[in-house]
Image (spheres, rainbow, N blue to C red):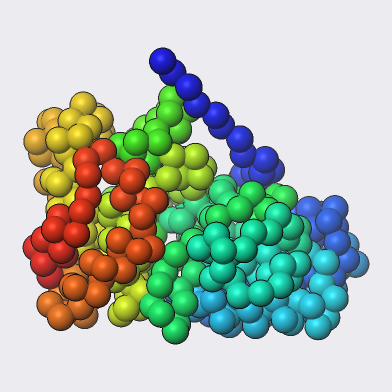
Amino acid sequence: MLNFAYHLPVNLIFGAGSADRAGEQTALWGKKALLVTGGSSARRSGLYDRVCASLANEGIEAVAFGRVEQNPLTTTAEAGAALAKQHGCDVVVGLGGGSVMDCAKAIAFLALNDGDVSDYIYGRLTGGRALPLILIPTTCGTGSEGNGFAVLTNPSTGDKKSLRTPAVIAKASLIDPACMATLPKKVLASVGFDALCHSMEAYTANAAAPLSDALAMEAVQLISSSLVPLVTGADESMEMWEKLTLASTLGGMVIGTAGVTLAHGMEHPASGIRNIVHGQGLAALTPAVIEALLPGRPEKFARLSVLLGGTGAGDCADAVRDLLSRIGLSVTLGDLGILEEDVPWMTENCLKVSAGNLANCPVPADAGMIGDIYRRCL
């Protein structure tokens, strides 16, 4: 019998120029914003100044917090929350890629919940409040603008795991495809592949449902027609950027319902221990993971293969490898600095931090399978 639920209370505002509505949307929730950013890319492109001007036009004071790393740390989120409290911020604006948005979510949560964020991540503490969030993605990858997840790395333990609570679902996400056009091609390849993995994993997950399947299939089709042309420069039209950006948001919505499986579960320990780029870690792992999980969902992997240019379930992994080659993302874990000696720790850590992901796999994933895949991907 078919039973499922779908609940996503987020206001998605999509379209070129939507980032300029930051002030309008933020003003609905507060008067003093903590503006969370990462490096300097938003400043170089002029987007940071545009957002600041939009906030100022609505009489909103902005307090800058620009310290977010590519794999955001629990300590960074704690520092941001302390700054928000110090200045009496009543709303958080996250301007950047998935790392920035995830950190902004954690900051908004910690501003109203005392204690160590890791206790909330592991369920030792619970909290149902957060400062209102406005998110403006600048990369088309994580889909963090469309769910209630915030992935953080604990620098003391190396654990990379997500805070999951409806409290950190954005009050509004301003999804502007024009903001993506300045992405370096290497970054675009990485984030675009992350978006693809979200939908592929959610589609083949145990928690998949009809609505998440429909969104996932649409996202995979959009990525299959837009990622290669954008990365290679064959077609950089706004239509292509709209396709990839929409696919990224759909992927975020999909994992908010159906979750992810083994590739993400195995990548988090890898980037937790070596601080590698998430999308590159996924590129190193995903083909081998598909081969391991294929027996559990052959009909779904067959559909994915066809959308990616293959012919059926048996060549789904090769279709992904071909895509990775075309976008210049054919890498191994060894290329990314992972060593044979890291495998035991990563395997143990995967079982610890990714138990939910493993339970969501279409075939049982144990220590033997995980260790074997890590070694094959070195």
Going by the picture, which residue comes out furthest to the front?
124
Residue at image position (31%, 50%) is 358
Q: Nearer the viewer, residue 37 or 273?
A: 273
Q: Position of residue 221 (x, y in %)?
A: 34, 35
Q: Position of residue 187 (x, y in %)?
A: 37, 67
* Residue 12 visible at all: yes
Residue 378 as seen in the image, left or right of residue 80: left
* Residue 52 visible at all: no
Residue 28 drawn above or below residue 50 = above
Going by the picture, which residue comes out furthest to the right?
59
Q: Nearer the viewer, residue 116 or 143?
A: 116
Q: Position of residue 174 (x, y in %)?
A: 65, 52
Specify the quadrant that holds the N terminus: top left
Specify the quadrant that holds the C terminus: bottom left
**Can you tell which quarter of the image residue 314 is in?**
top left
Residue 202 drawn above or below residue 39 = above
